[in-house]
Image (cartoon, rainbow, N blue to C red):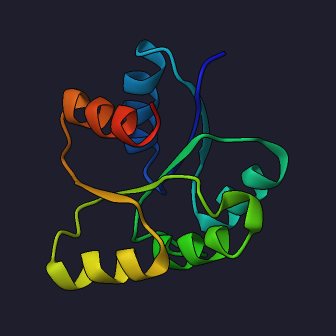
Amino acid sequence: MAKRVLTVDDSKTMRDMVAFTLKNAGFDVVEAEDGQKGLSVLGSANVDVIITDVNMPNMDGMTFIRHVRAQPQFKATPILVLTTEGSDETKQKGREAGATGWIVKPFSPEKLLQVVNKVCP
């Protein structure tokens, strides 16, 4: 059975690029345009890994990660941050919120797949 990935990003173009890359590699992909929608998706879909942006309307990525980690069934689910934010301070905030890994935009499809496969073998 294919691994399922939730992508959370307010940019439709970015969600499309991530979904295209993952689907071509055999993953099942579900999408949400912000953290609030992401939490709704998690309520109805089992996922193996989550990829989220940081800067989004309604609920930013850090808040989303904290909400996900507060739910026992997602304590061990890998969460990757895919963002333009690359500062050490922001990465530290991500780790404190519960992020598993960090990918800086723009990303290469190979790098995305390498990281997803590493956290979700």
Instruction: Residue 109 in the image: state x and y as whole percent.
Output: 25, 29
From the image, which quarter does the C terminus lie in?
A: top left
Instruction: Residue 37 in the image: state x and y as whole percent.
Output: 69, 59
Question: Relative to 119, does residue 61 appear above or below in the rendering?
Answer: below
Instruction: Residue 13 in the image: state x and y as whole percent.
Output: 39, 40
Relative to residue 88, is residue 43 drawn left or right? right
Q: Residue at x 75, y 58 (%)?
A: 73
Q: Residue at x 75, y 67 (%)?
A: 72
Relative to residue 101, is residue 99 drawn left or right? right
Question: Relative to 30, does residue 51 appear above or below in the rendering?
Answer: below
Instruction: Residue 44 in the image: state x and y as whole percent.
Output: 84, 46
Decide which of 68, 73 is in the foreground and name it.
73
Decide which of 57, 62 is in the foreground and name it.
62
Q: Residue at x 48, y 70 (%)?
A: 61
Quarter of the image where one finds residue 82: bottom left
Quarter of the image where one finds residue 33: bottom right
Relative to residue 110, is residue 37 drawn left or right? right
